[in-house]
Amino acid sequence: MRVTYHLSSQNMPAVAAEAAWAEAMGYDGVSSSETAHDPFVALTLAATATSRVTLETHVAIAFPRSPMVVAYTGRDLQDLSGGRFRLGLGTQVKGHIERRFSTVWESPGPKLREYIQSLRSIWRAWDTGERLDFRGRFYQFSLMTPFFSPGPGQHEPPPVFNAAVNAYNCRVAGEVSDGLTLHTFTSAEYVRRVVRPNIAAGAERTGRNPAQVKINGGGFIVTGPNRAALREADREARRRIAFYASTRTYLPVLECHGFQEIGQRLHQMSLEGRWEEMGELVSDEMLDAFAVVGEYDEVAEQLLERYGGLVDEVGLSVATAGEADEEQLRRIIRRLQAAG
């Protein structure tokens, strides 16, 4: 099982050092998400400080950017990193696309599929010199003169993963992507009952082997050196679970466990601005469904017991305080990697 680290620094000049630390800890990959900073810029910095780990967007928001813009950025990062870049794309939700990015929200699942198909068409035109002629419902690309083409890449085009919560986007991954990036707000049961069957259905539509589609997941991971540390992490996990459960986008995950009524109550509390109280509605049963909770010497086996055979890689970002914690983290990483 691959183990990836998510860059946490909000201080861009510190990103390179953080990425170098993650590589030294033994991680297989380093990822950056599109929250308060551009993920491509963070990975550019990470590329200059590392030599082995993959560099992954988990995720970049697709629709505010033309596929052509992302094709250029992806090619440049792939060349800069020596072939270590992996492009993860997500749709976000309607409110953010329309009100934060001021772009059009339309048929997100079909549009995401076409987005990935057009990316591959652009990269193929650069690599082979064939005429660019992609004509879809949402995107049309038919102009690529030699002056604007970077020509054949130094490496293969980067793998493309798409993020998914709903069944439709899981099928999109099965049809056209190299992998699927699951949201942290997921569960082993949801992967088993919804994610994997829909990847298989999508793969069948295009004659692919579902095993070609790698799954990155693992849910919330709550760990620490002792029970006192776990109690503190437990409160933060409940707060985050409540935040996501209050968003209607994640209703299918709640329905998988019969928690939809709690989700409705949390949504109403979010409208009332009662954010500090929401974590109190997350029961022990709900926490257990969405989080793996265990001390350092327990958590690897618990992760493997729950997600072994269901996902190919897991995101594990643990705050450490000193060499003792770091050595424990190295052991956890090695144990997960040894599971294959």
Image (cartoon, rainbow, N blue to C red):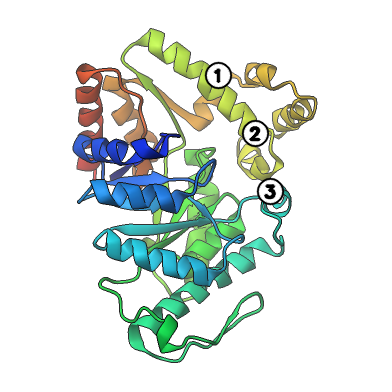
C-alpha separation, residue under disc 2 versus residue under disc 1: 15 Å
**Which percent across, then down, holds residue 148?**
44, 81
Mark 2 / mark 1, whichever is N-terminal: 2
Q: Is residue 5 above or below residue 280?
A: below
Q: Are marks 2 and 1 in contact (CB under 8 Å)?
A: no
Quick one: label 3, few (<14), some, or many (20+) residues within 10 Å?
Answer: few
Circle on res. 284? 1
**Marks 3 and 2, how far apart in space?**
21 Å
Q: In the picture, which quadrant includes the N terminus?
A: top left
At x 29%, y 72%, the residue is 156
Residue 187: x %, y % from top left = 50, 38
Image quadrant in which you'd find residue 279: top right
Residue of label 3: 100
Residue situated furthest top in the rendering:
228
Viewer-closest of 205 and 20: 20
> Residue 96: x, y in percent?
68, 48
Sequence-wise, the earlier of marks 1 and 3 is: 3
Residue 213, relative to residue 71: is it above or below?
A: above
Q: How many C-alpha atoms fall within 10 Å of the one at disc 1: few (<14), some, or many (≥20)?
A: few
* Neighbours of disc 2 within 10 Å: few (<14), some (14-19), many (20+): many
SS for callout 3: helix
Q: Viewed as shown, does residue 293 lie left or right of 24?
A: right
Label drawn at residue 245: 2
Kind of residue sitting beneath label 1: Asp
Q: Element under label 2?
A: helix
Q: Residue at x 66, y 32 (%)?
A: 259
- Horizontal side, residue 19 vs residue 311: left or right: left
